[in-house]
Image (spheres, rainbow, N blue to C red):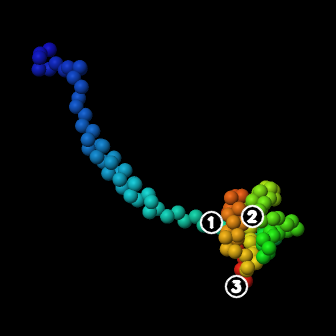
Amino acid sequence: MGNNGDFNWDELPDLNITPLVDIMLVLLAILMVTTPTIVYKEDIVLAKGSKTQKVIDDPIIEIRIDKNKNIYIKDSVFSYKNFTDSFILFSSTYNKDTEVRIRADKDIVYGDVIFVLKTIKEAGFLKASLITNG
């Protein structure tokens, strides 16, 4: 055998995979653009909900303040000075999502009503409101 006909088994062929990568990237880009626009046509029938009203109303704490600064909650009477501690003890059995309504006499000073409101907020109740006539 001559030098011209010798085949070198150690020589690796040059593979050019750049066109393959380019085609795959283009296909991937097309797939990424078209996938979000596919609309599925399955019909879904939702369950019927009941149209009845809530049977059990959420509990409400109603606080009444008379013009002598006596504070009434249900059948209990609290003094204005000790209201903070008394209310924290009273409200420990209630869920903090319970609505609290305050009814105050119109002759009560604004600051006294705010003190009661602040005490309610410090006890952890978030749903507190003032009840008015109008």
Q: Position of residue 51 (x, y in %)?
A: 75, 74
Secondary structure at badge 3 equals: loop
Disc 2 crowd, CA 10 A, few/some/many (<14, 14-19, 20+):
some
Mark 1 sits on what residue?
44
Q: Position of residue 52 (x, y in %)?
A: 78, 74
Q: Amino acid at mark 1?
A: Ile
* Residue found at the very far bottom of the displayed protein: 134
Q: Is residue 15 above or below residue 20?
A: above
> In 3D space, how far apart are the residues under numbered discs 2 and 3 (Cα atoms)?
24 Å
Q: Amino acid at mark 2?
A: Thr
Q: Are marks 2 and 1 in contact (CB under 8 Å)?
A: no
Disc 3 crowd, CA 10 A, few/some/many (<14, 14-19, 20+):
few
Residue at coordinates 62% horizontally, 66% vertically from top-left?
44
Residue 66 in view, yes or no? yes
Mark 3 sits on what residue?
134
Seen from the viewer's position, the closer of residues 50 and 110 is 110
